[in-house]
Image (spheres, rainbow, N blue to C red):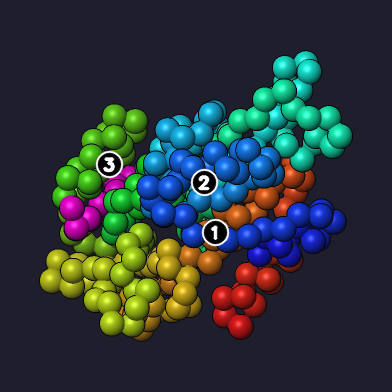
């Protein structure tokens, strides 16, 4: 996806994947800064840890408490911080890592586009409160939903997110646990569904997927998880996390380049890579 976008923009760049151990994240980020990368993306479990490892935080990272995109910046002679790719022959006086979050906006955009659903005034059930689930909970609450129900294996995590939402958005009704009656949207933000042997992320004794008018699974491989299959067969509208992956990546490319991302080209490359 990123290399297709980079090629379409005519840039002599290359997007590469590196496996970095948790305990080596700080060293990896320092290496990227020393080698003056244009930027990088972070995935789980690095997003929260990186908050304390970058030199500057964008409002998006502060608001959603996670960094998934980093832009490497240099300081010029006028002491202005500029994206590293703007330095050609001139060497920057200093280099820093600037952290952003592109996940939150991507979640909402994908839900709106793929399910045709507006979150304002909606009743939403979110399964999973760690990592992506935590970001999703905060962002969804900011969209002025009527009610948000958060379920998590570790109750304390769900409780912490609920407390944060009550502080930030006192008009949103937030509850830890499953709802009674129907919801407009149920979201899976857990890893359950990556393997065919996984149980459903929802407790069928407390909530039936038939109670959800729409179901969104952040997992995009497989294209249809057992939860999405069950929801579709029960009559719910369904969508997977491909759109979220696309839009967070496209926004990252825009942060690095300062140019509009070629969305259609990136979407086509993403679908081909993931689904063949």
Q: Which residues are magenta?
A: 145-154
Name which residue lies at 25% across and 52% down: 150
Name which residue lies at 80% across and 36% down: 86
User: What residue is pinned by disc 3?
Assistant: 161
Q: Are marks 1 and 2 in contact (CB under 8 Å)?
A: yes
Label 2 element class:
helix
The alpha-carbon separation of the residues under discs 1 and 2 comes to 10 Å
- Which residue is at the front of the view, 260 or 85? 85
- Which residue is at the front of the view, 73 or 266? 73
Looking at the picture, how far across and down is residue 31, in whole percent?
57, 43
Name which residue lies at 54% across and 59% down: 18
User: What residue is pinned by disc 1?
Assistant: 18
Label 1 element class:
loop
Q: Earlier in the sequence, mark 2 or mark 3?
A: 2
User: What residue is pinned by disc 2?
Assistant: 28
- Which residue is at the front of the view, 185 or 103? 103
Label 3 element class:
helix
């Amino acid at each position: 996806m990123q290399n297709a976008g980079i090629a379409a923009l005519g840039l002599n760049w290359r997007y590469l994947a590196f496996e970095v151990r948790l305990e080596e994240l700080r060293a990896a980020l320092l290496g990227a800064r020393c080698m003056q990368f244009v930027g990088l993306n972070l995935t789980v479990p690095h997003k929260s840890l990186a908050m304390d490892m970058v030199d500057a935080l964008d409002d998006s990272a502060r608001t959603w408490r996670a960094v998934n995109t980093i832009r490497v910046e240099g300081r010029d002679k006028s002491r202005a911080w500029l994206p590293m790719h703007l330095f050609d022959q001139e060497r920057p006086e200093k280099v820093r890592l600037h952290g952003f979050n592109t996940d939150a906006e991507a979640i909402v955009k994908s839900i709106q586009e793929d399910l045709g659903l507006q979150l304002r005034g909606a009743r939403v059930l979110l399964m999973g409160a760690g990592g992506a689930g935590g970001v999703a909970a905060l962002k969804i609450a900011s969209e002025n939903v009527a009610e948000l129900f958060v379920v998590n294996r570790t109750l304390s995590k769900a409780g912490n997110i609920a407390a944060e939402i009550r502080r930030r958005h006192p008009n949103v009704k937030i509850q830890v646990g499953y709802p009674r009656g129907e919801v407009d949207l149920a979201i899976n933000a857990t890893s359950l569904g990556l393997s065919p042997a996984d149980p459903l992320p929802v407790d069928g004794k407390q909530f039936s997927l038939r109670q959800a008018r729409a179901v969104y699974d952040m997992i995009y491989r497989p294209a249809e998880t057992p939860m999405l299959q069950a929801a579709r067969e029960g009559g719910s509208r369904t969508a997977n996390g491909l759109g979220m992956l696309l839009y967070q990546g496209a926004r990252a490319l825009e942060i690095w380049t300062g140019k509009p991302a070629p969305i259609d080209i990136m979407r086509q490359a993403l679908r081909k890579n993931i689904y063949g």
